[in-house]
Image: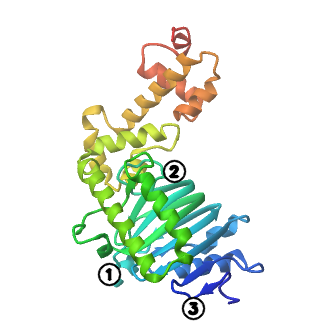
């Protein structure tokens, strides 16, 4: 018990484990234990957390006969990445289903490229490459084999699927998952297995309803435009970063924008539109702030873009009526 902080209860009907840092344990050793615990599918670089002196992570985990359900509290930024070599050699087939209760997360690739927030549900398939970064978050996580999603689920590609908080069934799924986690200490194994089975059936239905009818048919350009809209304020937004987030090649992305004068020029045009709107709405707003909000690296770079690509100057835009 000195090695594994917290507690292990294996004598109850549903075994329980708490992973936490020992009071005198170094961050490097603690993160090494975390890395060892998830090494069956993901990589963690323990040395990276030495730069986060206030980082902390605690996980409560219940082991059911048909899956694992856990809740993790994270202070700081925590990142896991698929260990594809290990997954391929062991033929891992687990699904990681995340319910985000606090904080923010980013995954690459996702089906939409959109940020992940409170109430969203994310599905990761360990058989596929992926990276997940979480910041100051609380997440509830279910780990199950693909077969537990039901015989009709088949080999459906669900890696990177996100059920947003406002989607039908999302609220019910989040409530059920949270209540199951909280009530498991008082349940028998058969009760826990039955409750998780029902939750997975509802989740499988929500996934198939949402992705088969919508996102599988979304074009590359639609998905890329969603990324650009949500990340327009980021100066580093580029064809490479968009392709990485969507899990596609740059050549595929270039083809989607070839009739719009290319990805780079499309992003620049969207930055100009964003800046134009800011100036019109608030003519007194400092140009440095306008540039920052629209993703230009400086106000001078924004002015050059206006002069090169529009027929009016920023000063003329300021004089226009909203």
For the point 23% across and 72% down, the residue is 151
Snapshot quadrant of residue 314: top right
Is disc 2 surrounded by few (<14), some (14 to 19) or many (20+) residues within 10 Å?
some
From where the camera sits, is residue 65 visible? yes
Q: Is residue 140 above or below residue 42?
A: above
Query: What residue did someone put label 1 on?
Result: 91
Query: What residue did someone put label 2 on?
Result: 117
Residue 7 position, x and y percent, is 65, 83
Foreground residue among 15 and 295: 15
Query: Is label 3 or label 2 in front?
Result: 3
Q: How many marks?
A: 3
Q: Is residue 31 above or below residue 248?
A: below
Marker disc for residue 112 = none
Foreground residue among 294 and 197: 197
The mark nearer the N terminus, 3 or 1, is 3
Foreground residue among 143 and 198: 198
Q: Is residue 54 above or below residue 301?
A: below
Is disc 3 surrounded by few (<14), some (14 to 19) or many (20+) residues within 10 Å?
few
Query: What residue did someone put label 3 on?
Result: 11
Query: Is label 3 or label 1 in front?
Result: 3
Question: Contact (CB < 8 A) between labels 3 and 2?
Answer: no
The mark nearer the N terminus, 2 or 1, is 1
Residue 34 position, x and y percent, is 58, 77
- SS under mark 2: loop
Query: Is label 2 or label 1 in front?
Result: 2
Residue 9 position, x and y percent, is 60, 86
For the point 21% across and 67% down, the residue is 152
From where the camera sits, is residue 39 visible? no
- SS under mark 3: loop
- SS under mark 1: loop
């Amino acid at each position: 018990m000195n090695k594994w902080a917290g507690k292990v209860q294996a004598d109850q009907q549903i075994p329980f484990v708490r992973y936490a840092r020992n009071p005198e344990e170094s961050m490097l050793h603690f993160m090494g234990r975390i890395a060892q615990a998830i090494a069956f599918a993901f990589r963690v670089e323990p040395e990276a957390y030495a730069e986060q002196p206030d980082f902390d992570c605690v996980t409560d985990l219940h082991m059911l006969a048909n899956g694992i359900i856990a809740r993790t509290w994270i202070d700081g930024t925590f990142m896991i990445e698929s260990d594809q070599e290990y997954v391929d050699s062991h033929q891992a087939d687990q699904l990681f289903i995340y319910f985000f209760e606090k904080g923010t997360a980013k995954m690459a690739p996702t089906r939409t490229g959109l940020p992940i927030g409170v109430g969203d549900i994310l599905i990761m398939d360990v058989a596929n490459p992926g990276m997940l970064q979480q910041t100051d978050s609380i997440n509830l996580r279910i780990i199950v084999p693909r077969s537990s999603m039901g015989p009709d689920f088949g080999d459906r590609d669900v890696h990177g699927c996100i059920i947003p908080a406002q989607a039908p069934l999302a609220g019910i799924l989040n409530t059920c998952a949270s209540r199951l986690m909280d009530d498991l200490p008082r349940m028998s194994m058969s009760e826990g297995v039955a409750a998780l089975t029902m939750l997975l059936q509802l989740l499988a239905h929500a996934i198939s309803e949402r992705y088969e009818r919508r996102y599988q048919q979304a074009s590359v350009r639609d998905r890329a435009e969603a990324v650009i809209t949500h990340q327009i304020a980021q100066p580093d937004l580029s064809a490479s970063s968009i392709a990485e987030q969507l899990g596609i090649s740059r050549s595929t992305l270039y083809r989607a924008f070839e009739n719009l004068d290319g990805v780079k020029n499309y992003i620049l045009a969207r930055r100009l539109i964003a800046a134009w709107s800011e100036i019109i709405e608030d003519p007194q707003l400092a140009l440095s702030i306008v540039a920052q909000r629209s993703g230009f690296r400086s106000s001078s770079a924004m002015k050059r873009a206006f002069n090169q690509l529009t027929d009016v100057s920023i000063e003329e835009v300021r004089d226009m009526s909203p």
